[in-house]
Amino acid sequence: MIHIDILTLFPELFESPFGYSIIKRAKEKNLVNIHLHNIRNYSTNKHRSVDDYPFGGGAGMVMQIEPIDNCITSLKKLRTYDEVIYMSPDGEMFNQKVANQLSTQANLILLCGHYKGIDERIREHLITREISIGNYVLTGGELAAAVVVDAVVRLIPGAMGDEQSALSDSFQDDLISPPVYTRPATYKGWNVPEILLSGHQAKIDEWRYNQSVMRTKERRPDLLDEK
């Protein structure tokens, strides 16, 4: 089982992505515990404010250190965390390899930033890992955190109906998945490759591997360069 605590200013944003499909089933099977923590609840300010102007001036607001520290400190009294992750556009790039790593951990914290970011002292003293889902900036870290949780939870044994399905996903072996087909075998004159109808599993596996290599060379040659 994986325990995931998400620190956010907008817990409502997670209701839909975590309420359906694989994540919902994984929660019902007690394969994952996901807890949402509203950072405002840890503010000592009577207005529950969590942001302030940046020292040195400049546009935008910065998330304060105290509410975030209070939240993380209270959680660490309950369990030991493998990673305290900040969802940041300048973090390491999230990929399948990182998802595989995180899926083997027991306890994770994901911090969702907002505004111009978080007080740098949080990153220096409280965060153990920073992750980005792409070279762009989002309004907040919630969508990025949802992406990470989705990619991680589907790798937990028992989360998917067919556990082998996750092993054949794109990027698991640094290759893009081969093309897939289903019934009918012929539609508007468009035919499924004969090899897939042959019943010869060894030849089918070879065809799929060759298709993966070819597609990767055509569409994502950077994956091959990384090997």
Image (spheres, rainbow, N blue to C red):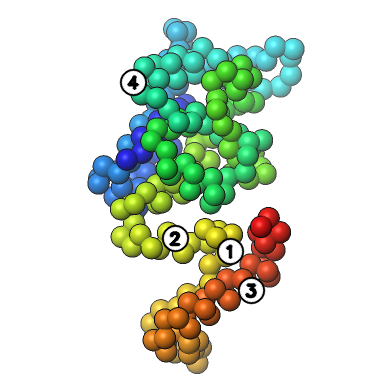
Residues at marks 2 and 4 touching, judged by CB atoms closer than 8 Å: no
Residue holding disc 4: 78
Report whether residue 49 is seen: no
* Amino acid tagged 1: Leu
Q: Mark 3 vs mark 2: which is more N-terminal?
A: 2
Q: Name the spot of residue 98 as percent of width and height, x first.
A: 54, 45
Q: Mark 4 vs mark 3: which is more N-terminal?
A: 4
**What residue is drawn where x is 49% and y is 18%?**
68
Residue holding disc 2: 167
* Quarter of the image where one finds residue 12: top left
* Amino acid tagged 2: Leu
Disc 4 to disc 1, how far (Cα)?
40 Å
Residue holding disc 3: 214
Q: Mark 3 vs mark 1: which is more N-terminal?
A: 1
Check the picture and name the quadrant holding the C terminus: bottom right
Q: Is residue 134 above or below residue 170?
A: above
* Amino acid tagged 3: Met
Q: Name the spot of residue 193 as percent of width and height, x first.
A: 50, 86
